[in-house]
Amino acid sequence: MAFAIIPATGWADTAPCEKNFTVKDGLFDSKIYKTWQDLVALTQQMIFNRTYAYLVKDGWVINRTDKESGVISASQVEESTGGVGKVANLNILIENAGNYYGGLPSGRGVPGGFRVTMTFSIPSGLNAHEEMVRKNFCDILAEIKGGTYGANLK
């Protein structure tokens, strides 16, 4: 699966990403991987542009975006031997972190920050190793925070 081969990037602080990582079974034997991290000192537009650029350069197909609401939906198709591809979906939401406190919606969140939530779902029949997905999520968030993909995107 292509998600498992996202290149490793700089060694930024990934503790929040790793701590917030969860895995659960979805409908019809699918798996859903999720994490979130609050980012400060970046505007929502900067985070959106950096995220979009990273995904495009990494080969994701961008299905839908909404800059105003901070949503990017992307996918990758894994070809099977029968010629029928299965689609793995990645959804990213960028929202005001001030809406959260202790991981719960509230009015006392991280002032001036934005929460980036990433949800990756794979259908039954595809495999993604949990540790690799966690590492790739955190690598993406590290790049968004200040990596090379977003250095010139403001």
Image (tube, rainbow, N blue to C red):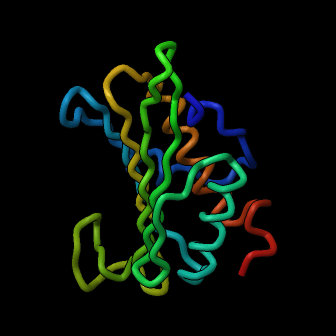
Left or right for 70, reference 106: right
The x and y percentages for residue 149 are: 76, 61
* Residue occupying the point 42% across, 31% down: 86
- Name the foreground residue: 133 vs 103: 133
Residue furthest toward the left? 27
Q: Is residue 112 visible?
A: yes
Q: Is residue 37 visible?
A: no
Quadrant the N terminus occupies: top right
Image side of residue 64 versus residue 43, left or right? left
Question: Image check: 146 left or right of 52?
Answer: right
Pick the front one: 142 or 75: 75
Q: Is residue 47 above or below residue 84?
A: below
Q: Residue at x 25, y 36 (%)?
A: 24
Depth order, front residue of 118/111: 118
Q: Residue furthest front?
A: 83
Where, by quadrant of the figure, is residue 69 drawn?
Answer: bottom left
Q: Above or below — where is 32 with respect to 145?
A: above
| Residue 110 higher or lower than 134, as above or below | below
Q: Which residue is rendered at x = 51% and y = 13% of the image?
A: 81
Counting from the top left corner in percent of width and height, residue 143 is at 68, 58
Please provide percent x and percent y for residue 30: 28, 31
Total tally of numbered discs in the picture: 0
Work out which quarter of the rendered image holds the C terminus and state it. bottom right
At x 61%, y 64%, the residue is: 52
- Picture coordinates of residue 17, whole percent (x, y): 48, 51
Q: Is residue 54 above or below residue 130?
A: below
* Quadrant of the image occupied by residue 123: top left
